[in-house]
Image (tube, rainbow, N blue to C red):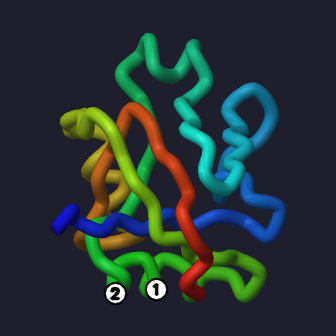
Amino acid sequence: MKKKYYKVVCWDLTSPYMSGSNEVQYAVNEWVSAPEHNSKKGYHLFVFDSIESAIRFKECTAGWKIYECRIKSTRKIPQALMEYLMEIVPTGIVMAKRVKLLKEVI
């Protein structure tokens, strides 16, 4: 059985906290990658490895949704970025090169 991952998105299926040229627009059943200028710097897409971690992150805003997703090509999170992320969500963050939303779970 494949490992389950979870993506938190805004009501319009965009990534929370991203805007302008950094914004990522998701769609159900479509593979999505980070904007090219971010991926060249080693920044890709963030998902959670458990529903519990995704729920903790979602508690920040009522309008966000959680989707079960598939991922391709996990990447190591740069140390400085990981330290920042750990302040927001202490566990369960995974960085992936590509993400496909499967179904809304919350």
Q: Crowdedness of circle 2 by 10 Å Cα count: few (<14), some, many (20+)?
A: few
User: Which quadrant of the figure contains the N terminus?
Assistant: bottom left
Q: Using the numbered discs, state the Cα–Cα distance from disc 2 to disc 1 in whole angstroms.
A: 5 Å
Q: Residues within 10 Å of mark 1 (few under 14, many from 20)?
A: some
Residue drawn at x 44%, y 36% as measured from the top left: 98
Residue 92 got which mark? none
38 or 70: nearer the viewer: 70
The amino acid on which the numbered mark 1 sits, given as a three-letter code, is Ile
Secondary structure, mark 2, is helix
Q: Point out residue 94 in the picture as x, y percentages from the top left corner.
A: 29, 53
Image position, residue 27 (x, y; %):
71, 50
- Residue 75's x, y, as percent? 24, 34
Image quadrant assignment for residue 87: bottom left
Report the amino acid beneath label 2: Glu
- The number of callouts visible is 2
Q: Is residue 7 left or right of residue 30?
A: left
Residue at the image position 27 percent from the left and 33 percent from the top:
73
Residue carrying label 1 = 55
Disc number placed over residue 52 in the picture, else none: 2
Q: Is residue 34 above or below residue 90?
A: above
Q: Position of residue 28 (x, y in %)?
A: 66, 56
Nearest to the observer: residue 9 or residue 83: 9
Judge whether 45 appears above or below 42 on screen.
below
Dot 1 falls on a residue whose secondary structure is helix
* 56 is higher (above) or lower (below) than 5: below
Q: Is residue 57 left or right of residue 48?
A: right
Residue depicted at x 43% and y 85%: 56
The quadrant the C terminus occupies is: bottom right
Label 2–label 1 contact, CB within 8 A: yes
